Amino acid sequence: MFTKNMDMDYFNQETERLKFRKVETSDIESWSEFFVDNDRLHFLGIPDLTRGKFTLAAEWINLQLERYKTGSVGHLAIIEKSTGKHIGMAGIIPRTINDQSEFEIAYSLIPNCWGKGLGTEAASQLKKFGFENKLSQRFISIIHINNTDSIKVAEKNGMSIIVEMEYLGMNVFVYGTPNQSFE
């Protein structure tokens, strides 16, 4: 749960090239492009990818809207400043790993935005926000063991492997930041 000021800050973050904002139902059409010609969808553990891009996008967006209603963190829409386009989702996601509450730094980009350092930029901003606002003493990222690009992002974000395990029916690495102490 957020305090009112942290809530406002979380939903209005910026980096050099990116702006973050709450997702909206109007994002379904632009987010549906994430599900087109994306050879990495199998890394996400989505149970049925045959339901169509608009259905998948709507389910994703609606899940985030439900998280917001409960006062929880969740994915944010990523807007590329130079174009004003919705290029992805990123956020701090509550998870339970081995019966322990954690916060995952997660991101997904529309395929034509891969390889430009935008995932690293988004993940780094979320880690910075989380530590500055003392949301958790550590953050994790759950990554399919064959997702080499996301592994590189996690390592650039100062994370290392905590455990290898099964998650959503997939073999994954759980990467984590070193614990921070708050005074």
Image (cartoon, rainbow, N blue to C red):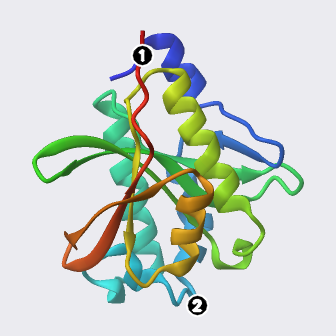
Spot occupied by residue 55 in the image (x, y as percentages of width and height)? 39, 73
Residue at screen point 13% across, 53% down: 98
Q: Amino acid at mark 2?
A: Asp
Tag 2, which secondary structure? loop
Residue 9: assigned label? none
Up/down of 126 relative to 137, above or below: below
Label ID, residue 37: 2
Q: Secondary structure at mark 1?
A: loop
Residue 145: quarter of image: bottom left
Nearer-the-camera pick, 109 or 24: 109
Which residue sits furthest left? 99
At x 70% / y 52%, what residue is drawn? 121
**Depth order, front residue of 57/178:** 178
The residue indicated by pointer 1 is 182
Q: What amino acid type is highlighted by mark number 1?
A: Phe
Q: Is residue 21 visible?
A: no
Mark 1, other Cα within 10 Å: few <14 / some 14–19 / many ≥20: few
In the image, residue 26 above or below residue 69: below
Q: Nearer the viewer, mark 2 or mark 1?
A: 1
Image coords of residue 83 (percent x, y): 86, 57
- Marks 2 and 1 sit apart, C-alpha to C-alpha, by 44 Å
Q: Quadrant of the C terminus?
A: top left
Using a 10 Å C-alpha cutoff, classify the residue at mark 2 as few (fewer than 14 neighbours), some (14 to 19) or many (20 or more): few
- Percent coordinates x, y for residue 59 in the rendering: 35, 63
Q: Residue at x 16, y 43 (%)?
A: 100
